[in-house]
Image (cartoon, rainbow, N blue to C red):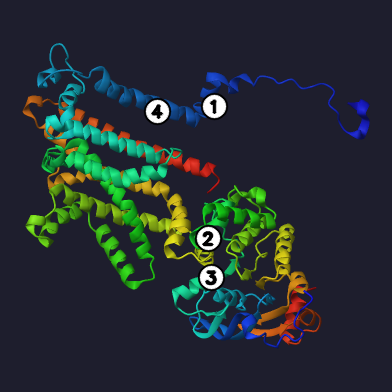
Amino acid sequence: MSAIGDQGYLRALPAEPLSPPPARSGMFGWLRVNLFSSPANVALTLLCLLFIALVVLPLVRFFLIDAVWSGTDRDACLASAAQPHPGACWAFVRVWFSYFIYGFYPLGERWRVDLFFLALAFGVVWLSWLSAPRRAIGAVYFFVVLPVLSFVLLHGAPPIGLKIVSTSLWGGVLVTIVVATIGIVVSLPLGILLALGRRSELPVVKLVAVGFIEFVRGVPVITVLFMASVMLPLFVPERLAPDKLVRALIGVALFASAYMAEVVRGGLAAIPRGQYEAARALGLTYWPMMGLVVLPQALRVTLPNIVNTFIGLFKDTTLVFVVGIFDFLRTIEAARADPAWAAPNIAVTGYVFAALFYFACCYGMSRYARSVETRLARAGRQ
Amino acid sequence: MQDRPGNPSVAPPAAEVAVEIAGLHKWYGDFHVLRDINLKVARGERIVICGPSGGGKSTLLRCINRLEDWQRGRIVVDGVELTDDPKRILAVRRDVGMVFQQFNLFPHLTVLENCTLAPIWVRHMPKRDAEALAMNYLARVKIPEQADKYPARLSGGQQQRVAIARALCMNPNIMLFDEPTSALDPEMVKEVLDTMVELANDGITMLVVSHEMGFARQVADRVILMDDGQIVEINGPKNFFDHPQHERTRSFLRQIIH
């Protein structure tokens, strides 16, 4: 180096890449960095291992290793010489499975329900897959074709040979999906309208929106359901009184709308005044300004909260049992009371099955929302 | 720039009036922001409004396309008197473009979509035509290559030029600029001012709230000083800067030109 003197430095030999220091890479390196990097970390790691040994292993044992997978009645799941400590009774779920899905929907007509599930899944995938072709047609399918198709399939249409199936026979996952879907599909647009109404400069519109939102939010969802199911018939002649399920649907949809309105209002409040002014200065009137400039941004900001509300709504559908509707959870309740399956582990099994179903649905929604957020962030749209 | 009116107090002929403001008063609560404003702007005239902050400059500008309302007085824009009638307000807004201090581009739309939004939804122009029009104006503000980007990816100066192109896409007869360079980093001020000078040379009517005195000297037909909600002085740029008449103009100029 001294050959160059005080002019600076010139590299004479290329620096070859070296492999990283051993302790930082590979499995042991990972363990050291992530689990055993400090005394506190070592203690936490050991505590977690203890927790896994004491709690997780027995759960796995109960629900998988010792579980009973087949059988026709309670005898299969009772303790016996062959199995002194029987685990979860999945045989019970297998036997009752179709009841959990369809409720009392007539056996010969259940293909209609399957077709409905298929049509719904098709619409959901079309709309939620953001790069799917022809999403505008997808929206028409979802919001116009699907409701009609679902009604014809599930309720029936005698002229085309589909027997009418009374909603009192509907049950299980079918009811849960119908209530949740209608709640979600109605609450978003209605919630947006209510939120806009609440920020409106027209006093009557504002009064109605605020009154509705505050009233519905101020009472428990069970009260709304009772009101929908008991009070609605008081206002219309008995002959025209809507079906019990329809009443519950209206109750759930209105309740969800009030919450959605507040969520959307939060998003609207996040939009700077300059956006409104720029839109107005360009000559846009109220609805184009809202639809093209304000709402697309507001809904994007508030997407996590919207999905959070959907998830809450999905779980709240279990409350329709209070007005005598057999949703998924209620069918499990009913089945576990069956004397043919009276065994100590039946209730646990049924509830865990229900928990798995609700978790799968809610976690799916949550993951989907995350992926949309990441995608929007990547697009640089903020 | 050569045919400036020699005497600024002479009113232009009625048919040639782009904006007429008469006896305008505005209050925010008890605060009297605009006090007896009278101003006639001729078609094609370039007006620069300056003055200390809080003097009512921006408020006056925002009254002209009715982003603000007022309690007394009248404003006539291109022969349409602004009232509470939404149809008139819309007619005026379609005719008047506005550029804001904070750009106010729509962040969820690309540069091109920002420019085509109003032509498509307000003028009901076919999308293809609107895009051709927008590309034409983006080329004029010298950023056609940014058309497919989102505003957040652009520099402040580029964003403001997009905002100018967006306003021009409505083919306005009058352009309002509300402190268009105040939010920009110093090195970006020039690119925006250059764009505005070009626009001025095309003969569009311009009302500019700005403290860019070089721009005012170069482009303005008349310069207005507003203070305490009043018009203190209206003068041609040469007189305004070299022989200011009013004491407040002199003290204002002393403060901003060292």
Question: Mark 3 sits on what residue?
Answer: B93
Amino acid at circle 2? Ala
Q: Do circles 4 and 2 both sit on a common chain?
A: no
| Alpha-carbon span between mark 4 and mark 1 | 17 Å
Q: Do circles 4 and 3 both sit on a common chain?
A: no
Question: Mark 4 sits on what residue?
Answer: A48
Query: Is residue A188 visible to the viewer in this orientation of the structure?
Result: yes
Query: Residue at 44% across / 38% down in the picture?
Result: A133
Q: Nearer the viewer, mark 3 or mark 1?
A: 3
Amino acid at circle 1? Val
Q: Whole-percent x and y of residue A181?
A: 28, 44
Relative to B140, is A329 above or below?
above
Q: Do circles 3 and 1 both sit on a common chain?
A: no
Q: A238 or A85, which lies in front?
A: A238
Secondary-structure class at tag 4: helix
Say whether residue B200 is left or right of residue A258: right
- Chain under numbered label 3: B
Amino acid at circle 3? Arg
Query: Is residue A101 visible to the viewer in this orientation of the structure?
Result: no
Could you tell me which quadrant the N terminus of chain A lies in? top right
| Alpha-carbon span between mark 3 and mark 2 | 11 Å
Question: Mark 1 sits on what residue?
Answer: A33
- Earlier in the chain: of badge 4 and badge 1, it is 1
Secondary-structure class at tag 1: helix
- Chain under numbered label 1: A
Relative to A244, is B193 above or below?
below
Question: Mark 2 sits on what residue?
Answer: B118
Q: Whole-percent x and y of residue A124?
A: 34, 39
Query: Residue at 40% across / 37% down in the picture?
Result: A367
Dot 1 alpha-carbon crowd within 10 angstroms: few under 14, some 14 to 19, many 20 or more = some
